[in-house]
Image: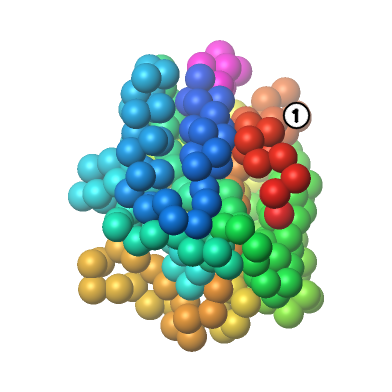
Amino acid sequence: MIYLKTPEEIQQMRAATTLVSQTLGEVAKWIAPGVTTRKLDTIAREFIRDNGGRPACLGYEGFPGTLCIEVNEVVVHGFPSGYTLREGDIVGIDTVVEKDGFMGDSCYTFAVGEISAEKHALCKTTRESLAVGIEACRPGHRVGDIANAVQTYCESRGYSVVREMCGHGIGRHMHESPEVPNYGRRGTGPVLRNGMCICIEPMINMGSRNIVIEQDGWTCRTRDRQPSAHYEHTLAIIDDQVHVMTTFDYIHQAIEDRFI
Ligand code: MF3
Ligand code: CO
């Protein structure tokens, strides 16, 4: 069942979507060779709490961190650890914040120092595919229109789309209906309408689309160990208009010209 929100509820959601955006901006300042992913996690957890939020991933179905850490071949749901970021890595940072009873969810894939042209192109295409998905999100259109737009954009550029993981509805819960896949057919799926809040999050691979889940039960990586990129925004539809509730502006301010 899709919970439609009132404009007031969507307004209330701004606290969480702003704070999750600021959190990624804070983490962005620290991304560099030599930093452990656990350090990034600590910074995010303290920042969220200092700003009156709750790190919603921490303890969610037993997840052990505030941040999902996605280094190179990790697609989603990697744990913060003693791993030290290295020049040439790409690292996706995905997190959810709860504030004022609502959730905000966003993800950005960062370059650690200088990265290869291939990784740069993967990140660029994935980020552009998020923009293309957002563009396809219009009241009266369907979830499949978003899915097809992302898929077509990425596959026509030689990348593959992870199918096992999807975007999702969001609100008082991190994951609500509907599922928002990154592949599918136009004109299929639920109709997009006022009161819907969704997360669009393309997870795009350089090699094949196949994934494996590691022994820890969470870490999802590409089967061929080629890199994967991931970007995510939380959106709301109010008064026949689409509002992108999260922003990468804080990230771009933090990393200036180093952004991908
Ligand atoms: N944005 C991620 C998702 O939608 C957040 C997962 S938090 C976790 O799956 F706790 F489940 F890891
Ligand atoms: Co999400």
Could you say where residue 256 lies in the image, as x and y percent from the top left? 72, 40
Residue 9 falls within the magenta-colored stretch: yes
Residue 172 higher or lower than 9, as above or below: below
**Position of residue 74 in the picture relative to residue 157 (left or right):** left
Label 1: which residue?
Answer: 240
From the image, which quarter does the C terminus lie in?
A: bottom right
Residue 49 lies, with reference to residue 176, above or below; the image says above
Q: Is residue 246 magenta?
A: no
Viewport quadrant of the N terminus: top left
Question: Taking 21 as reference, is 103 left or right?
Answer: left
Residue 170 in the image, given as x and y percentages of width and height: 48, 38
Helix or strand or loop: what does disc 1 sit on? loop
> What residue sits 54% from the left and 80% below the top?
226
Residue 99 percent across, percent down from the top left: 41, 22
Residue 3 in view: no
Q: Residue 212's image quarter?
A: bottom left
Identify which residue, 31 or 78, lies in the foreground: 31
The vertical placement of 210 against 229, above or below, is below
Quarter occupied by residue 217: bottom left
Type of amino acid at the residue the image marks with label 1 = Asp
In the image, taking residue 129 as reference, residue 223 lies left or right, namely left
Given residues 224 and 189, the one toward you in this image is 224
Q: Residue drawn 30% across and 73% down?
A: 214
Q: Nearer the viewer, residue 67 or 81?
A: 81
Instruction: Name which residue lies at 73% across and 63% down.
Output: 125
Where residue 155 sits: x, y (%)? 72, 75
| Residue 48 visible within the image | yes
Identity of the residue furthest to the front in this view: 34
Magenta stretch, residue numbers: 7-14
**Predominant SS along the magenta part:** helix
- The residue depicted at 30 percent of the width and 56 percent of the height is 81
